[in-house]
Every structure is written in C-alpha cells, then in structure tokens.
Amino acid sequence: MRKVTQVITTFAVAAFLSMLSGCTPRVEVAAPEKPITINLNVKIDHEIRVKVDKELDQVLSSNSGLF
C-alpha cells in the first residue's frame, strides 16, 4: 500500500510540475513589419550668415572710416 501511495504522489508531483511549466510567461522579440523612419526637420541657415558676414566685410573694408 505504501508503494501505491508513493507512485500516486510521484505522479501527482509530476503532473503539477508539468502544468506549472505550461504557465510560464514567454517574451518574444520580433522585427517590425514596417521600416523605422526618422524624420529630421533641421533648418540650416549657416549659408545666410556667411553671406551677411561677407557683405559686412565688404562694407567695412570700403568704408574704413565708419568706426
């Protein structure tokens, strides 16, 4: 009788562990279906500043008595 109880207990523990392992959370990492787009709205105005600096250099060199 003791052997039967031991077998039933072993079976119950095995069944419990198999059910418990079925409830473990699963994390999946997958690539997106659409490509990732990065929109960079950058305003570049350094050309305007260079033109203004060149014009100021010409004004200052032509009118050296200005300052």
Image (cartoon, rainbow, N blue to C red):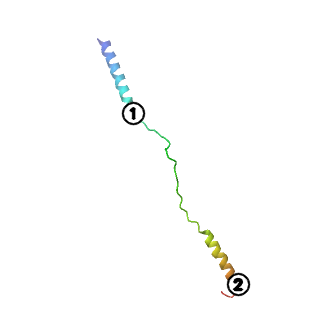
User: Of circles 2 and 1, which is in front?
Assistant: 2
**Mark sitting on residue 4:** none
State the residue position of label 2: 62
Q: Is residue 3 left or right of residue 44?
A: left
Quadrant in the picture for residue 11: top left
Identify which amino acid the numbered label 2 is placed on. Answer: Ser
- Mark 1 residue crowding within 10 angstroms, few (<14) / some (14–19) / many (20+): few
* Residue in view at x 32 percent, y 17 percent: 8
Residue at the limit of the structure toward the front, as seen here: 34
Give the secondary structure at mark 2. helix
Q: Is residue 48 above or below residue 41?
A: below
Percent from the top left, x then y, of residue 29?
48, 40
Q: Earlier in the sequence, mark 2 or mark 1?
A: 1
The foreground one among 27 and 39 is 39
Give the secondary structure at mark 1. loop
Quadrant in the picture for residue 54: bottom right
- Mark 2 residue crowding within 10 angstroms, few (<14) / some (14–19) / many (20+): few
Identify which amino acid the numbered label 1 is placed on. Answer: Thr
**Mark sitting on residue 24:** 1
Percent from the top left, x then y, of residue 53?
65, 75
Percent from the top left, x then y, of residue 32?
49, 44
* Residue in view at x 64 percent, y 72 percent: 50
User: Mark 2 to mark 1: distance in Å?
Assistant: 82 Å
Q: Is residue 42 left or right of residue 22?
A: right
* Residue in view at x 42 percent, y 36 percent: 26
The foreground one among 35 and 54 is 35
Quadrant of the snapshot with the N terminus? top left
The foreground one among 19 and 42 is 42
Q: Is residue 40 above or below residue 65?
A: above
